[in-house]
Amino acid sequence: MLIRGSDSAIDLPSILTEEEKWYFDLQGYLILRQVITADEINQMLRLGSHWLEQPDQAPPPLRVTVKEYGGVINPLPYGDRIFERTSLNEKVLRVVMGLMWNRPRLFNCALVQQKKEPVSAGEKEKLHRDTSGFDFPDGFRNPHNDYQAGNGQIYSNYINTAITLVDVPKENGFTCIPGTHKSEINFPDSLDIDNLWAPAETFELQAGDCLIFSPRLMHGARYWKMAYPRMVIFNRYQFSFYFNENCSLPLKDHADRISADQFELESIQRGKKEFARRILDKIKRGEKLC
């Protein structure tokens, strides 16, 4: 006799369309257009640029790392609640929830700046898979970064979203080799990012667009060629049911700086979260997501 607990994905209806499931399974990514508004983008750019230029003026508990050709700010929502519009965005969360059985946990939110820099002749960008902080031996599947599909369902227990705050022309910014989220073969040392067997792709994006991708993809960033800096917000989600890597969030001593929904999003939790229930209810009623 098979005994199941109260939490089960056996009969879970997917909130992804059949086209989205097919495309994500094939490619390992989806692009959502214009998930945040121009006013929101301007506010985020103003705050992010200011903190990168004046790191000492960034409010605690933000950590600002400035390098010669870029910088990183995290955990971003604790700087200003406007950034919750990226991590709690209902249009984005619908897809994230659909990929991880409605139980997402945010474990990192960072603004990444990338500037144009001198590049030596013949120098190539690097590709990688994300590990969640722990590398598994060759031949083993990392349970913290796994991808499965079957019986009309998808399960990806680690998802990245990248919302760009600036326009990204082709051959700039995020790059990946589509389909490699399913590969169990190591990337051959003889191949580089521009190989003819499986060349890496880039994407033309407008400010406000969101790339949702499996961190199992072989991915990286092309050298930035534009006069203005690349500014992108990365949100990293984990299946909340039992994974507790990167468990520094939420920051309980600074909980007053984020909303109750954001605190719940960052929390390790067995059951379905309240913000997820609200999104599912809106979808059932046919209401527009914001």
Image (cartoon, rainbow, N blue to C red):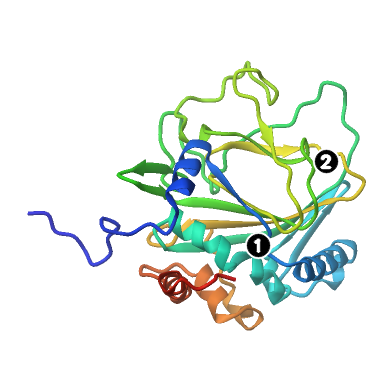
Local secondary structure at mark 1 = loop
Q: What amino acid does circle 1 point to?
A: Val
Looking at the image, which residue is at 30% across and 44% down?
151
Asked if the residue at tag 2 contacts the one at tag 1, i.e. Cβ–Cβ closer than 8 Å, the answer is no
Local secondary structure at mark 2 = loop
Give the quarter of the image for residue 53.
Answer: bottom right
- In percent of width and height, residue 90 lies at 55, 68
- In percent of width and height, residue 157 lies at 44, 51
- In percent of width and height, residue 223 lies at 80, 37
Q: Is residue 12 visible?
A: yes
Up the image or down, 96 lies above or below 57; here it is above
Q: Earlier in the sequence, mark 1 or mark 2?
A: 1
Q: Is 284 left, or right, of 197 in this rendering? A: left
Can you tell which mark lies on residue 224?
Answer: 2
Identify the residue under disc 1: 35
On-image quarter of the C terminus: bottom right
Q: Nearer the viewer, residue 227 or 268?
A: 227
Q: What amino acid does circle 2 point to?
A: Trp
- In percent of width and height, residue 26 lies at 48, 36
Label 1 packing within 10 angstroms: few (<14), some (14-19), many (20+): some
- Outermost left residue: 1
